[in-house]
Amino acid sequence: MMARILLVEDNEMDGDMLSRRLVRKGFEVEIAVDGRQGVEMALAGGYDLILMDIRLPEIDGWEATRLLRAADATRTVPIIALTVHDMAGDRDKALEAGCDDYDTKPIELPRLLGKIDAVLGRRA
Protein backbone atom coordinates (compact mmCIF):
# COMPACT_ATOMS: atom_id res chain seq x y z
CA MET A 1 0.00 0.00 0.00
CA MET A 2 1.65 3.21 -1.14
CA ALA A 3 1.61 6.27 1.07
CA ARG A 4 -0.77 9.11 0.16
CA ILE A 5 0.80 12.55 0.42
CA LEU A 6 -0.96 15.90 0.52
CA LEU A 7 1.38 18.56 -0.88
CA VAL A 8 0.30 22.07 0.14
CA GLU A 9 2.18 24.36 -2.25
CA ASP A 10 1.03 27.60 -3.89
CA ASN A 11 3.80 27.72 -6.51
CA GLU A 12 2.33 25.66 -9.34
CA MET A 13 5.69 24.89 -10.95
CA ASP A 14 7.31 23.78 -7.66
CA GLY A 15 4.26 21.73 -6.71
CA ASP A 16 4.06 20.06 -10.09
CA MET A 17 7.76 19.22 -10.17
CA LEU A 18 7.89 17.83 -6.61
CA SER A 19 4.63 15.94 -7.14
CA ARG A 20 5.94 14.21 -10.28
CA ARG A 21 9.20 13.28 -8.57
CA LEU A 22 7.32 11.78 -5.59
CA VAL A 23 4.91 9.90 -7.89
CA ARG A 24 7.93 8.39 -9.69
CA LYS A 25 9.10 7.17 -6.26
CA GLY A 26 5.76 5.40 -5.85
CA PHE A 27 3.79 7.85 -3.71
CA GLU A 28 0.23 8.95 -4.44
CA VAL A 29 0.22 12.77 -4.36
CA GLU A 30 -2.55 15.37 -4.29
CA ILE A 31 -1.88 19.11 -4.33
CA ALA A 32 -3.60 21.92 -2.44
CA VAL A 33 -2.75 25.44 -3.66
CA ASP A 34 -3.27 27.41 -0.44
CA GLY A 35 -3.49 26.89 3.30
CA ARG A 36 -7.28 26.89 3.44
CA GLN A 37 -7.61 24.27 0.70
CA GLY A 38 -4.83 22.27 2.37
CA VAL A 39 -6.70 22.20 5.67
CA GLU A 40 -9.98 21.24 3.95
CA MET A 41 -8.37 18.43 1.95
CA ALA A 42 -6.44 17.15 4.97
CA LEU A 43 -9.58 17.08 7.12
CA ALA A 44 -11.44 15.19 4.38
CA GLY A 45 -8.80 12.66 5.14
CA GLY A 46 -6.94 9.61 4.13
CA TYR A 47 -3.44 11.09 3.90
CA ASP A 48 -0.39 9.38 5.38
CA LEU A 49 1.73 12.53 5.27
CA ILE A 50 1.37 16.27 4.64
CA LEU A 51 4.13 18.36 3.05
CA MET A 52 3.30 21.91 4.11
CA ASP A 53 4.78 24.95 2.42
CA ILE A 54 5.03 27.72 4.98
CA ARG A 55 4.54 30.79 2.79
CA LEU A 56 0.97 30.32 1.57
CA PRO A 57 -1.96 32.56 0.61
CA GLU A 58 -5.18 32.50 2.67
CA ILE A 59 -3.74 30.76 5.75
CA ASP A 60 0.03 30.36 6.14
CA GLY A 61 1.62 26.99 6.81
CA TRP A 62 2.11 27.67 10.52
CA GLU A 63 -1.59 28.41 11.04
CA ALA A 64 -2.70 25.54 8.79
CA THR A 65 -0.52 23.16 10.83
CA ARG A 66 -1.99 24.44 14.11
CA LEU A 67 -5.52 23.93 12.74
CA LEU A 68 -4.69 20.37 11.66
CA ARG A 69 -3.11 19.55 15.02
CA ALA A 70 -6.27 20.78 16.77
CA ALA A 71 -8.55 18.45 14.75
CA ASP A 72 -9.06 14.80 15.71
CA ALA A 73 -8.91 13.62 12.08
CA THR A 74 -5.44 15.05 11.46
CA ARG A 75 -3.87 15.28 14.92
CA THR A 76 -1.49 12.36 14.27
CA VAL A 77 -0.83 12.77 10.53
CA PRO A 78 2.89 13.57 10.09
CA ILE A 79 3.56 17.07 8.71
CA ILE A 80 6.86 18.17 7.18
CA ALA A 81 7.22 21.92 6.76
CA LEU A 82 8.79 23.18 3.52
CA THR A 83 10.28 26.65 3.44
CA VAL A 84 12.60 28.68 1.25
CA HIS A 85 14.15 30.35 4.23
CA ASP A 86 16.62 28.42 6.28
CA MET A 87 16.27 31.13 8.88
CA ALA A 88 17.42 30.63 12.43
CA GLY A 89 14.40 29.72 14.47
CA ASP A 90 12.30 28.45 11.56
CA ARG A 91 12.93 24.83 12.48
CA ASP A 92 11.91 25.52 16.09
CA LYS A 93 8.86 27.45 14.89
CA ALA A 94 7.89 24.49 12.65
CA LEU A 95 8.18 22.00 15.49
CA GLU A 96 6.35 24.36 17.83
CA ALA A 97 3.44 24.66 15.37
CA GLY A 98 3.21 20.87 15.37
CA CYS A 99 5.30 19.81 12.38
CA ASP A 100 7.18 16.53 12.69
CA ASP A 101 10.11 17.75 10.59
CA TYR A 102 11.26 20.58 8.38
CA ASP A 103 13.03 20.83 5.03
CA THR A 104 14.30 23.75 2.98
CA LYS A 105 13.87 24.69 -0.66
CA PRO A 106 15.23 24.13 -3.17
CA ILE A 107 14.18 20.57 -2.31
CA GLU A 108 16.93 17.98 -2.47
CA LEU A 109 14.87 14.86 -3.16
CA PRO A 110 17.15 12.31 -1.44
CA ARG A 111 17.20 14.42 1.72
CA LEU A 112 13.41 14.91 1.67
CA LEU A 113 12.81 11.20 0.98
CA GLY A 114 14.94 10.38 4.02
CA LYS A 115 12.74 12.62 6.17
CA ILE A 116 9.55 11.18 4.65
CA ASP A 117 10.75 7.61 5.36
CA ALA A 118 11.67 8.62 8.91
CA VAL A 119 8.28 10.14 9.80
CA LEU A 120 6.30 7.38 8.04
CA GLY A 121 8.46 4.76 9.74
CA ARG A 122 7.76 6.31 13.14
CA ARG A 123 4.06 6.12 12.40
CA ALA A 124 4.06 2.48 11.21
Image: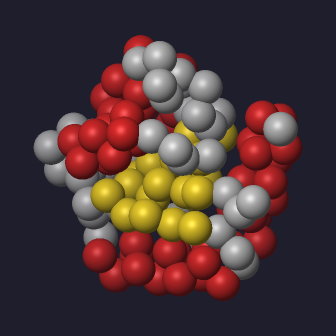
Does residue 78 show up? yes
Q: Position of residue 92 (x, y in %)?
A: 58, 28
Residue closest to the far left: 58
Q: Is residue 38 left or right of residue 28?
A: left
Q: Is residue 24 left or right of residue 17?
A: right
Residue depicted at x 53% and y 22%: 75
Q: Is residue 93 above or below residue 52?
A: above
Q: Is residue 31 above or below residue 21?
A: above
Residue depicted at x 41% and y 18%: 71
Q: Position of residue 56 (x, y in %)?
A: 26, 50
| Figure coloring | secondary structure
Quadrant location, the C terminus: top right
Residue depicted at x 45% and y 40%: 45
Q: Is residue 74 above or below residue 30?
A: above
Q: Is residue 68 left or right of residue 3?
A: left
Is 38 in front, or is 96? 38
Does residue 66 show up? no
Is 7 in front, or is 44? 44
Quadrant location, the N terminus: bottom right
Quarter of image, res 113:
bottom right
Q: Position of residue 9 (x, y in %)?
A: 36, 61
Is 116 in front, or is 93? 116
Q: Position of residue 30 (x, y in %)?
A: 43, 64
How many numbered callouts? 0
Is 96 in front, or is 45? 45
Residue closest to the far front: 1
Residue depicted at x 54% and y 47%: 47
